[in-house]
Image: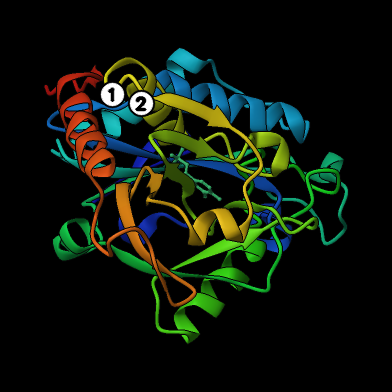
Amino acid sequence: MKIYLNGKFVNKEDAMVSVFDHGLLYGDGIFEGIRAYNGRVFRLREHIDRLWDSGKAIALNIPMTKAEMEKALLQTLAINKLSDAYIRLVVTRGAGDLGLDPANCSEPTIFIIADKITLYPEKLYTEGLEVITVATRRNMPDALSPNIKSLNYLNNIMAKLEAKRAGVPEAIMLNAQGYVVECSGDNIFVIKNGIVSTPPASAGALKGVTRNAAIELIKNKLKLELKEELITTYDLYCADECFLTGTAAETIPVVKIDGRVIGEGKPGKVTLKLFKEFRSLTRSTGVPINKK
Ligand code: PMP
């Protein structure tokens, strides 16, 4: 496996960063998780735009152009001969001293890892997931915007730990006001009486690339009403259907929340239709990997 690291391709064993890197010392950095399907990268520019926005928000100037970053990412896939992959793109503040001040960091560390994707078992797509709401609240947007995809994921990890302790794979997180926000690594949607709802970014949810694609498909292909609105645990428990979206998970049905059976306890019609539309979108669009 070859890793892109600061402009060069190096072997996995040689892909090292300094222990003085502020990405490691403070979680001071940003990242994207991106998918390639069937030789094409899904919504590449949208991910790169979000990375640049995350950089802007933390005053981290990425020392290359968006086009150069895209090229590096496509080359990483090509060099590793991958056509279906999960790509992790990371930009850290770089190596500095032991203080917080980013001004003492020389230059950002940039690396791109392209690997085979590990998915949720296929069974969960046909039978649905059980999830719980957890005590760990999502970061308050006025303290640290959840739209900054930063290297500090402890908030999400605390939620994930709670879910795993309860024997379920994902955690639903509420915000400080008790409204449903998102999961530790996925966005959430509910369907009631044919209307699809998802929490707005202002409630503290990440504007997921898969969420955006799902919203488009729901409106344009499924021709259903889509509301970005505050939802409560009551809305979850009484939903006809519920599903999660994320780059790794794609769209995945939820059939049980906090011990309550959702709808009929199996993936709902809308959820299954959306899954089909999403799979066809990911396999028919995207930036081609130019294999040399
Ligand atoms: N919320 C959080 C907290 C996430 O980490 C992710 C995964 N990046 C998502 C939602 C889903 O976003 P996307 O569809 O862009 O992968």
Q: Is residue 13 left or right of residue 77?
A: right
Residue displayed at 17% across by 40% down: 84
Q: Are marks 1 and 2 in contact (CB under 8 Å)?
A: yes
Q: Residue 89 sits in which quadrant?
A: top left
- Considering every residue shown, the one lying at the far front of the view is 193
Q: Which residue is depicted at the point 72% across and 32% down?
A: 60
Residue 203 is situated, as x and y percent measured from the top left of the image, at 71, 42
Q: Is residue 186 left or right of residue 224?
A: right
Q: CA distance from mark 1 to mark 2?
A: 5 Å
Q: Residues within 10 Å of mark 2 (few under 14, many from 20)?
A: many
Is disc 1 placed on a helix, strand or loop? loop
**Residue 249, horizontal then vertical, whole percent:** 32, 51
Q: Is residue 192 visible?
A: yes
Badge 1, how many Cα within 10 Å: few under 14, some, many 20+? some
Q: Residue at x 68, y 56 (%)?
A: 27
Q: Which residue is mark 2?
A: 218
| Disc number for residue 222 | 1
**The C terminus sits in image quarter:** top left
Picture coordinates of residue 263 (x, y %)? 34, 58
Looking at the picture, tell me which residue is in the foreground, 252 or 33: 252
User: What amino acid is found at the position of numbered circle 1 in the picture?
Assistant: Leu
213 and 155: which one is in front?
Answer: 213
Can residue 18 be spotted in the picture?
Answer: no
Judging from the image, what secondary structure is the residue with disc 2 in? helix
Q: Tell me which residue sits at (72%, 26%) in the image.
A: 56
